[in-house]
Amino acid sequence: MIDVLLVQPPIRDFYLTAKRTIPYGLASIAAALKSSGFAVEILDALAASKSRPVALPPEMADLADFYGQPDVSPFALFNRFRHFGSSFDQIGRRARTSGAWLVGISALFTPYADEALTTAAAVRAWHPDAVIVMGGHHPTAMPEQVLASPAVDYVLRGEGEASLPLLAEYLRDRRPVAGIPGIGPFSPSGP
């Protein structure tokens, strides 16, 4: 059993580049949590080489006429819109079997915020007792938008290496979390 599960969500896009998906930040946060005495695992949903075609999201429907045919160029970057990485249900099941009482989800890029929020919803569905916190550039810039999701309990803005170990400590000890640096506004449904 672990205390904290850190999740890098899958993405949906036309292509994937490994360099932009290495979870450097989650590794740093995991090290800080371990230094504070917590058992931690990272679930990198992009570490799997899985991908499958998915429909274009409604806001991109106008692109269907341009990208509906297979790209036969040597680069083939825009062949099909795809889901890269583990499925949301796989992530939810893994969160449940981990036994983690705190699940941190990374949302680095605003274009992939929907995938991060869908990841949070899957974790909530499969592991309803877990406390779910989201961090990264997107929640730092738009905490209220992220907290509008009933699946997200807290947002941490700024550097998670300092704030997530404090949040874990305060939650474990049942202390008020309002004074934690970077803590976002409270969710109406949050603990």
Image (tube, helix red, strand yellow):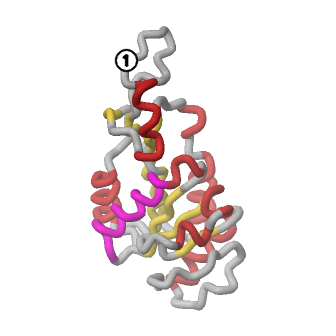
The stretch in magenta equals: 114-128
Residue 66, given in percent of the width and then of the height, sits at 45, 24
In the image, is residue 109 above or below residue 120? above
**Residue 175 drawn in magenta:** no
Q: Is residue 173 left or right of residue 70?
A: right
Q: Residues within 10 Å of mark 1 (few under 14, many from 20)?
A: few
**Residue 126 drawn in magenta:** yes
Relative to the observer, which residue lies in front, 59 or 142? 59
In the image, is residue 26 above or below residue 71? below
Residue 181, given in percent of the width and then of the height, sits at 71, 76
Relative to the observer, which residue lies in front, 87 or 54? 54
Which residue is drawn at the image coordinates 28% and 62% (left, top)?
Answer: 97
In the image, is residue 142 above or below residue 116? below
Q: Amino acid at mark 1?
A: Pro
The single residue placed furthest to the bottom in the displayed view is 175
Q: Is residue 33 left or right of residue 95?
A: right
Which residue is drawn at the image coordinates 54% and 65% (left, top)?
Answer: 134
Which residue is drawn at the image coordinates 34% and 54% (left, top)?
Answer: 91
At numbered mark 1, what does the secondary structure look like: helix, strand or loop? loop
Figure quadrant of residue 54: top left
Q: Which residue is mark 1?
A: 70
Relative to the observer, which residue lies in front, 61 or 88? 61
User: How many discs mark residues in the rendered view?
Assistant: 1
What is the magenta segment's predominant secondary structure?
helix
Figure quadrant of residue 22: top right
Residue 162, given in percent of the width and then of the height, sits at 69, 68
Which residue is drawn at the image coordinates 41% and 22% (left, top)?
Answer: 79
Residue 145, given in percent of the width and then of the height, sits at 56, 67
Figure quadrant of residue 37: bottom right
Q: Is residue 28 left or right of residue 88?
A: right
- Quadrant in which the N terminus is drawn: bottom left
